[in-house]
Every structure is written in C-alpha cells, then in structure tokens.
Image: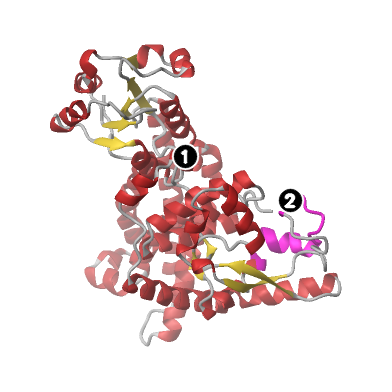
C-alpha cells in the first residue's frame, strides 16, 4: 500500500493545493489575457505571481492546514471561499499601493483585471475544494498513515497514544508496541491493543520493526534503567530511525511535555540559545511590524475609544504592571474593557462569563482591539510582537510556586501574540497556565525569526475566528 511515512497530513494537503494551483493558474492567466503567459508580462506584472502566493499564504495563516481543520472538512469548505476572496482582494490592494508609490507600476482595473480577479477566486476555490475532498478520501482509506513502533507499553506509552490521537499531525498512525520482560503493561493498552503488543525474546526490537516495516521507533518506557541500548543501536544500523519520547513529542505535538519533562533532556538537546544577532534582528522585526500595524489599526483604536466613552464615564486606557524579559516589570497599556475599580477587592482570574466586563469591552476583547495599545509597549522595547503572554506579578509568583520552570518563559520578552496564544484558549486557572507553559517553553527553546513570522501569520486565524477568548 502507498504510504507517506515522512509527510504529515497538513503537509500533504499543502503540497496538493500547490500542485493544483500551479496546474490551473497558467490556464487562468491565458483565459483572462492571451499574452499574459509571456515571460515579460509575468515578470513585470506582480499579480501574475501574487495571486497564487497570497492564496497559499492565507490558507496557511487561517489554519486550513491544521489538524482540526482537516478533520472537520465541512467547516473548512465553508471557510475556503472567504479565505480565497481575501487573498484576491489583498492582491488588488497591494497593486493599488504599488501603482501609487512606484512610477510606471500598472494600475489595477479594466475588463482584463476584473476577469482575472473573478477567475482566480473561482479557480482557487475549486482547487482547495478538490484538494480537501481528496485528502478526506485518503484519510478514510488509511492511505496517509505512518507505521510507528513504540518501545514501552506502560503509562508513558499510553499517554503518547492519547496525545497522538488528540494532537498528532498525522491523522492515522499504525502503532505497534514492544516491551521488555520486566516492564509492566498498562491495563488500558492490554484492553485496547492486545494484538499489537509484543515482548520479543532477548528484546529483539529490530525483528519486530522489520516485521511491521516501521517508519519510526519511539523510545518511551516508564523506566529506562537497565534497557538494552545495544538492541536499539541494532535498529539504527538496520535503517530504522530511533527517537526519544520527549524529542518526538516536541517535534510531533510542537510543545514540551511538562508532565514527563526531564531537566537532563533540556540541557543536552538543542535550543534556549539567543545570540546578539538574534536579539538585534528580533528588535528590528518588532519595530518594523509594530509600526506598520499601529498605522493600519489606528482607526480601530479610535473606534474603541469612542465606544468606551459612549458607554459611560471612566478612563479609556487601562495600565497594569506585568512581567517581561528576565522578570522585569513594566506598565502594559490596553483599552479598558472592565468596569471602573473592577479589582477593588483584589486581583482575580478572568472568568468565561465575567460580569465585570462591559458591553463595549466584550466586543473589544473578542475582536482583540483592546490589545492594540500594546504596540506602544513594543515600540518602547518593553514587549516583543511575538512572545509569551505578559502576566501580572502576583500571578507569576503563584504559578512559579506550583509549576516547575515557569520563570523560564521570561528568557524572552512578553509578546502581543505568541505560540501559546494561537494554540490554547485564554488561561484562567493553574492547569491552563501549565498547559500554556508547555507551548511557551517550546517557543523559547525553538526561537527563530521565521518561527515569529509563522506565529504572526496564524494570529490572523485567532483574530478572525476567535475561540476560547475571555
């Protein structure tokens, strides 16, 4: 059977989208304008390249390659036309700006360009529909699958299977488990997978890997002391990739498993390194992006100010101490969304149906407009555009006492958006904070400007389709 052992489902969908668009786009260009395929026209007219590029970029930014979007095909198909239309409109807006700023740049308009706009929207929507329907069929037929061999059959192996089922990037994994004679097998694994658990004589893992044609071997026993590492080395020599449990979770789930995290693993794996050049580039990135966003969103901030004033008396802006890089304190700026003196009785977590939030404040929170004044904090250097959510000092003290490594999130500046913010709902409890920390540590460990760009793009999904906002 055909297998895509090294390809996640999202990657396969992106590749299929790209192939279909590349196949259809020349036909669209030729239909709208027969001479559009000439090398001169394609190279000088930005729209010949911008339409497909921005289409794929926005499909990614709006989360249509994420696990949840792929699983819910119906919901994804309803969002596709909107996303494709946004990309086409964005091309027109960019063309208008370039026509105004760059001498000699073509001005969008006319029958040819209107036809190109319409054909692009229809063609790209059809491509996205077809790609998602094909992927749905492949998933149902178990074609897009990996063969995983897990070394271990205890509680850790069970937790790994649960995470793969809830958060894995591949939507169908064919899992086999092996264990040693001295390892106790988790009762739930015995109940659910009795025919996929092996205890090979002499701990001959390579023989089982060969039998199931494993794509990857994951070492996840409850107790590693006394494990026959020579048998695992034989697997590598036989051509089977071998990876440790924590490294696999980091790569697959894209967060750090705090429940089973080992300090030794953090010390010896790559990450948590920030050079002077990294910090310089990140600061330059912050200045450029925050300046552009502040100019573009100024009308929204003004509208928010008017809404707050209209609803009643009180200050428009809300200032509060928060924690940032190296535990330093700063005053964060937001549009006020709660009643005046909402915390007269002390600091409390925000609740899902918090009666302290005003009507205007509820809208500003859901649209994330109340966060926009933090762009000033970014320009001052107190925050970064991307980073862990800034928390209040009193909550930081409480959380650091109960959650190991909580202070490590302050190795970078607090951010307006971040990896935890786009992957986990707004936290309002100790357990929420623990879950968000698993994403924050992943971001700190794997920091790069490219990663910041990915997070910035996917923030659009959270703004347009908010979930879990409080």
Q: Is residue 225 above or below residue 349?
A: above
**Residue 271: in sight, yes or no?**
yes
**Residue 109: in sight, yes or no?**
no
- Determine the secondary structure under disc 1: helix
Between 467 and 211, the residue placed more toward the observer is 211
The answer to whether 129 appears left or right of 340 in the picture is left
The answer to whether 116 appears left or right of 321 in the picture is left
Q: Which residues are magenta?
A: 349-370
Q: Is residue 187 above or below residue 330?
A: above
Q: What is the spatial separation of the Cα atoms under label 1 and label 2, in whole angstroms?
A: 31 Å
Residue placed under numbered mark 2 in the picture:
351
Between 147 and 16, the residue placed more toward the observer is 147
Q: Position of residue 196 (x, y in %)?
A: 35, 16
Rendered image: mark on residue 70: 1
Q: Position of residue 290 (x, y in %)?
A: 51, 75
- Determine the secondary structure under disc 2: loop
Where is residue 154, by image quadrant?
top left
Does the segment drawn in magenta span residue 397?
A: no
Between 16 and 396, the residue placed more toward the observer is 396
Between 119 and 266, the residue placed more toward the observer is 266
Q: Is residue 15 above or below residue 375?
A: above
Picture residue at 34% right of the left edge, 32% below the top: 144
Rendered image: mark on residue 92: none
**Counting other residues with Cα less than 10 Å from the Cα at mark 1, is it few (<14), some (14-19), or many (20 or more)?**
many
């Amino acid at each position: 059977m055909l297998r895509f052992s090294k390809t996640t489902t999202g990657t396969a969908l992106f590749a299929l989208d790209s192939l279909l668009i590349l196949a259809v786009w020349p036909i669209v260009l030729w239909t709208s304008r027969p001479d559009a395929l000439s090398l001169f026209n394609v190279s000088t007219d930005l729209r010949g390249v911008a339409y497909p590029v921005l289409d794929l970029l926005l499909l990614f930014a709006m989360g249509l390659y994420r696990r949840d979007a792929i699983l819910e095909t119906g919901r994804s198909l309803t969002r596709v036309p909107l996303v494709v239309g946004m990309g086409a409109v964005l091309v027109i807006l960019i063309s208008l700006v370039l026509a105004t700023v760059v001498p000699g740049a073509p001005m969008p308009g006319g029958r040819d360009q209107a036809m190109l706009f319409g054909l692009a929207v229809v063609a790209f929507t059809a491509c996205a529909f077809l790609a998602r329907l094909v992927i749905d069929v492949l998933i149902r037929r178990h074609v897009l699958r990996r063969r995983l061999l897990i070394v271990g059959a205890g509680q850790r192996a069970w937790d790994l299977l649960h995470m793969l089922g809830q958060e894995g990037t591949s939507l169908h994994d064919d899992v086999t488990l092996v264990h040693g004679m001295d390892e106790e097998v988790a009762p739930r694994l015995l109940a659910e997978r009795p025919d996929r658990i092996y205890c090979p004589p002499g701990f001959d893992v390579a023989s089982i890997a060969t039998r199931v044609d494993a794509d990857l071997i994951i070492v996840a026993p409850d107790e590693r002391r006394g494990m026959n590492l020579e048998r695992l080395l034989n697997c590598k020599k036989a051509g089977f990739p071998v990876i440790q449990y924590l490294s696999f979770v980091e790569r697959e789930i894209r967060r750090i498993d705090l429940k089973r995290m080992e300090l030794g693993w953090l010390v010896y794996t790559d990450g948590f390194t920030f050079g002077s050049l990294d910090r310089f580039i990140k600061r330059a990135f912050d200045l450029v992006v925050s300046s552009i966003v502040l100019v573009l969103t100024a009308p929204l901030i003004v509208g928010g100010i008017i809404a707050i004033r209209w609803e009643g008396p009180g200050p428009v802006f809300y200032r509060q101490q928060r924690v940032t890089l190296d535990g330093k304190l700063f005053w964060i700026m937001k549009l006020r969304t709660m009643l005046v003196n909402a915390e007269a009785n002390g600091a409390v977590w925000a609740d899902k149906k918090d009666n302290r939030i005003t009507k205007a404040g509820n809208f500003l929170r859901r649209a994330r407009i109340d966060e926009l004044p933090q762009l000033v904090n970014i320009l001052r250097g107190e925050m970064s555009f991307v980073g862990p959510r800034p928390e209040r000092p009193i909550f930081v003290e409480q959380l650091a006492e109960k959650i190991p490594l909580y202070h490590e999130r302050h190795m970078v500046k607090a951010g307006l958006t971040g990896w935890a913010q786009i992957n986990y709902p707004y936290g309002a409890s100790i357990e929420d904070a623990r879950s968000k920390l698993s994403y924050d540590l992943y971001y700190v460990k794997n920091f790069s400007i490219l990663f910041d760009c990915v997070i910035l793009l996917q923030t659009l999904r959270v703004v347009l389709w908010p979930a879990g906002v409080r």
